Amino acid sequence: MRVKIYQINSNRDKAHFRFSNLAETTKLMQGNGVDSSLYDEVFNAELGTGDLEEIYTKFNIERHPLHRGDSLSVSDVVVTDQGAYFCDSSGFEKIDFDESKTQKPDDLMRVLYVEPGKVPYEAEIRNTLEGMQRAVCDGLIEPIFMDDGCVLVGNEEAKLLGMKRTIRHFSKAKATASPRWMWTMICRSTRMRATVWVLRRVCKKVSDFVWTFKSTVYILLVERRLTV
């Protein structure tokens, strides 16, 4: 399910609405509801749940690699397929919320995001080193440059950290280790080119994307052999 999270931008919040509950916000707005123009989009991605309490736990206690904001708190707005919900002092309240009036940073970069066991989907991350590191779960990035200009980016230490693989890869080249060592992001083989083609069929117009993977290689197959 596609889930979006919006938080009030402190620079535009002259009346200090942030962290106010819905009753206080409605009173300050003289009954006119929530002012959507104060909000910035801080998350827009696929989640395995649409349950608001589960979303609250995930974004208040845990962290998602594509989340660009602060911990989910009072006055934040969560948008799901069922509508927009205001994070109140206790629980969530459904509200009218105009997403077209919200804003988001100018330095965002569109990516095709691939998580283990999930269908790849289009997302946005900050076009910075920190943004890419965050997207691969706060690790050192490992870029692999494709012949057609696409770049695969993943966590360089994924194997050491025990992260789940995104795509199981088998190369025609002779390897000095068993197939379980051959991880995603090995690019110089027919199989990987085929994988890229399949992913492109899933998401349209991705020729200018940076492909961000949650898992990547610790061991790279470099044309001739697998280095352990």
Image (spheres, grey):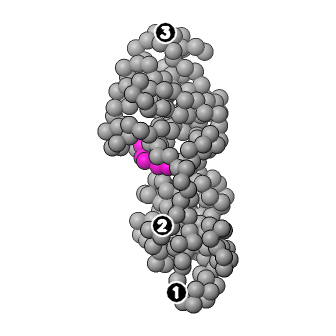
Q: Which amino acid, by three-letter code, is at mark 1?
A: Asn
Query: How far is the residue under mark 3 from the one under mark 2?
Result: 49 Å
Query: Is residue 32 among what the camera can see?
Result: yes
Task: Identify the mark at residue 32; answer none if there is no mark.
Answer: 1
Q: Residues within 10 Å of mark 2 (few under 14, many from 20)?
A: many
Q: Which dot, 3 or 1, sits closer to the camera?
A: 1
- Describe the element under mark 2 as helix, strand or loop: strand
**Foreground of the two, 148 or 186:** 148
Query: Is residue 137 among what the camera can see?
Result: no
Q: Where's residue 228, x and y in %? A: 60, 15
C-beta proximity under 8 Å, tags 1 and 2: no
200 lies above or below 72? above
**Foreground of the two, 81 or 99:** 99
Q: Where's residue 135, x and y in %? A: 57, 43
Query: How far is the residue under mark 3 from the one under mark 1?
Result: 67 Å
Residue pointed to by mark 3? 224
Residue pointed to by mark 2? 79
120 lies above or below 29? above
Query: How far is the residue under mark 1 from the one under mark 2?
Result: 20 Å
Q: Which amino acid, by three-letter code, is at mark 3?
A: Arg
